[in-house]
Amino acid sequence: MMRLPVLIGAAAVLNCYSATAQTPDSVPAAGKWYVGAGAGYHYYYSINRPYVRARPVYLMGGYTVTPKVSLQAEVQYGRVVNQTHNQGQVDGELYDFTYREETRSTAVTLLARFNRSQPSHHLQFDWLLGLAVVSGMQKDAAYRTSTTTGASSAYYYQPIRETTPHLVGGLGLRYLLGPHLSIGGELLISKNTKIPPVSVWGLAPGFGANLGVSYRFGAPAY
C-alpha cells in the first residue's frame, strides 16, 4: 500500500518534466547578446563622388531587448578597384593609357530588428530599420606608357573624401541551426539624408545585401 503514493508522485514528476522538455522541432531562445560576421555588397548613393560601391566584410554585435526587438551594430569595410585601358597617339607616338579608380569605404550601421516569427520556429523573419554613417574615399590615377620606347609617366588626382548619413531599412531572414548558431541574410535600401527629396535624384535609393553567420551567447533568456 505504501508503494502506491510513491508511484503516483513519481508519475507526476515525470509528467511535469516531459511537459516542459523541448520538442525536437523547437529551438530555445538563447542569451541576449550575439555576434556575427559575413560579407556583402552595398551601393550608397551620392550625387557627388565618391560613389561608394562596397563589397565589404562586416562584423556585428547585438542585444535582444525583448523576444521581438533587438538592437544591432555593424562595422563594414570595403575596397573596390576599377581599371580601364586604351591606346592613343600623342605627338604622333602611340601610347598605352591606363585609368585607375580606387574606392575605400567604411560604414557604421545601427539597426533595430523587429522579429515577426515565433521563437520556436527555425526560420526567423525580421524587419530592419536604422542609420548608417558612411565614409568614402576615392583616388584616381592615369598612366601612360610609350609602345615604342617603354617610357612611362603618371598623373595622380586629388583624393575625394566624404562622410554621409543614410537612413537604412529592409528585411532579414535567419535560419536557426540550434540555440546559439544561425545563418542568414539581409536585403537593405538606403537614403542619403544630405540629398533633399525634391527631385528624381533626391529620391534615388541605395541598396545592399549581406550574408553571414551569427552566434548567440549565454543560457536561455526567455
Image (spheres, rainbow, N blue to C red):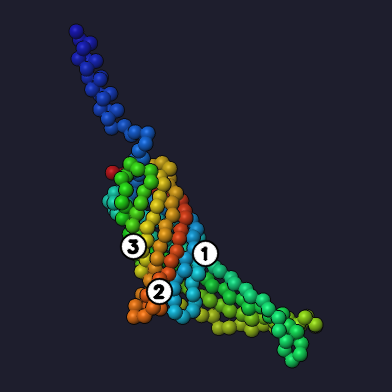
Identify the disc placed on residue 113: none
Q: Nearer the viewer, residue 201 or 185?
A: 201
What residue does disc 1 label? 55
Could you tell me which residue is drawn at 26 percent across and 25 percent down? 15
Could you tell me which residue is drawn at 39 percent across and 55 percent down? 172
Q: Is residue 70 above or below residue 49?
A: above
Residue 65 as seen in the image, left or right of residue 43: left
Mark 1 vs mark 2, foreground winner is: 2
Mark 2 is surrounded, within 10 Å at the Cα level, by few (under 14), some (14 to 19) or many (20 or more) other residues, namely some
Q: Of label 3 and label 1, which has the lower sequence position?
A: 1
Q: Is residue 207 above or below residue 114?
A: below
- The residue type indicated by label 2 comes to Ala
Q: Of label 1 and label 2, which has the lower sequence position?
A: 1
Per the model, the C-alpha gap separating discs 3 and 1 is 21 Å
Residue 151 as seen in the image, left or right of residue 164: right
SS at mark 1 in the image: loop
What residue does disc 3 label? 129
Question: What x and y, as percent, mark residue 169?
Answer: 36, 63
- The residue type indicated by label 3 comes to Leu
Question: What x and y, as percent, mark residue 164?
Answer: 41, 75
